[in-house]
Amino acid sequence: MKKEHVLHCQFSAWYPLFRSLTIKSVILPLPQNVKDYLLDDGTLVVSGREDPPTHSQPDSDDEAEEIQWSDDENTATLTAPEFPEFTTKVQEAINSLGGSVFPKLNWSAPRDAYWIAMNSSLKCKTLSDIFLLFKSSDFITHDFTQPFIHCTDDSPDPCIEYELVLRKWCELIPGAEFRCFVKENKLIGISQRDYTQYYDHISKQKEEICRCIQDFFKKHIQYKFLDEDFVFDIYRDSRGKVWLIDFNPFGEVTDSLLFTWEELISGRNLKGDFSEGDALEQDSPAFRCTNSEVTVQPSPYLSYRLPKDFVDLSTGEDAHKLIDFLKLKRNQQEDD
């Protein structure tokens, strides 16, 4: 995977080419001061609120005395920076898209931060909704700080013009989303997107779903994207119509879901036990889905609700933290 492959998967790079196949969207340049605010590690103070909170008057002199701490000259009051011009542009774009949007940056959406929103969703109606998700998301931080982390070329990092992408909000059923892997302009693999859950209709309709996606790929995507190796996500609605959702680089930076990248890159053992004998054609892509409720897993985004130290301890990924934790427990036992 090279840096140019990552650049070609930016939303603004592919959206003009495939506008008719995907969800209506608006792209806004992200001002540098907004980027700086989103990357600020300070206390989370959300900017962009249209209605500032109001404070009721104290009912008594005693209560007034209790809240006088805010007048102390040494007390620092946290206030969010305001971006009036950008706020106006964003609200106009949201209104033009029906009043609710799905936000993302050049590549990523803040899927890991949905839990912090009041509605536990990525559905946004104001800039403050977007800022809350973006400032809480590791995926967004990755876009800003490490967009070329898995690239193999040693050339200088290209200059990136960051953009806020607002997509018209649509209620998408997770069981209708699929990720498609393309190598040398050939569709080699299709994976259920929400692989943590079992969907009965996918198991029953896998051949039909596979043919439908193949037809969509050959008619609309093959030889039209900027690279010959890439990943694209689709949504198949209740009528069987396929919608393009996103493009991703063909490499480790992209989640391979029910495949491994070793399988996808080498091409070996792709179909394995997942093909249905003669039911699928020899040149058809490998199709993988969760086959039973026994294999259902928790959402991979749940770990983002916990402090990273907790996650490292539970997975054993950081040996030093685990050793320190065990030493602490031993000392506590000795003290007892």
Image (cartoon, rainbow, N blue to C red):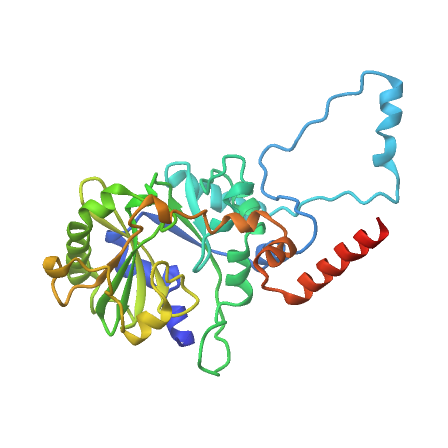
Asked whether 266 or 239 is in front, the reply is 266
**Which residue is depicted at the point 26% across and 67% down?**
270
Seen as rendered, the residue at the extreme bottom is 154
Residue 16, x across and y down, in percent: 30, 59
**Which residue is depicted at the point 32% across and 47% down?**
24
Residue 242, x across and y down, in percent: 22, 49
Asked whether 81 or 64 is in front, the reply is 64
Total numbered labels? 0
Could you say which quadrant of the image residue 172 lies in? top left
Asked whether 79 or 188 is in front, the reply is 188
Residue 36 can be seen in this image: no
Q: Quadrant of the N terminus?
A: bottom left
**Which residue is depicted at the point 65% across and 56% down?**
309
Residue 27, x across and y down, in percent: 41, 54
Seen as rendered, the residue at the extreme top is 59
Left or right: 310 with respect to 16?
right
Residue 173 can be seen in this image: yes
Left or right: 48 with respect to 245?
right
In the displayed structure, 129 sits above or below 179; it is: above
In the displayed structure, 94 sits above or below 12; it is: above
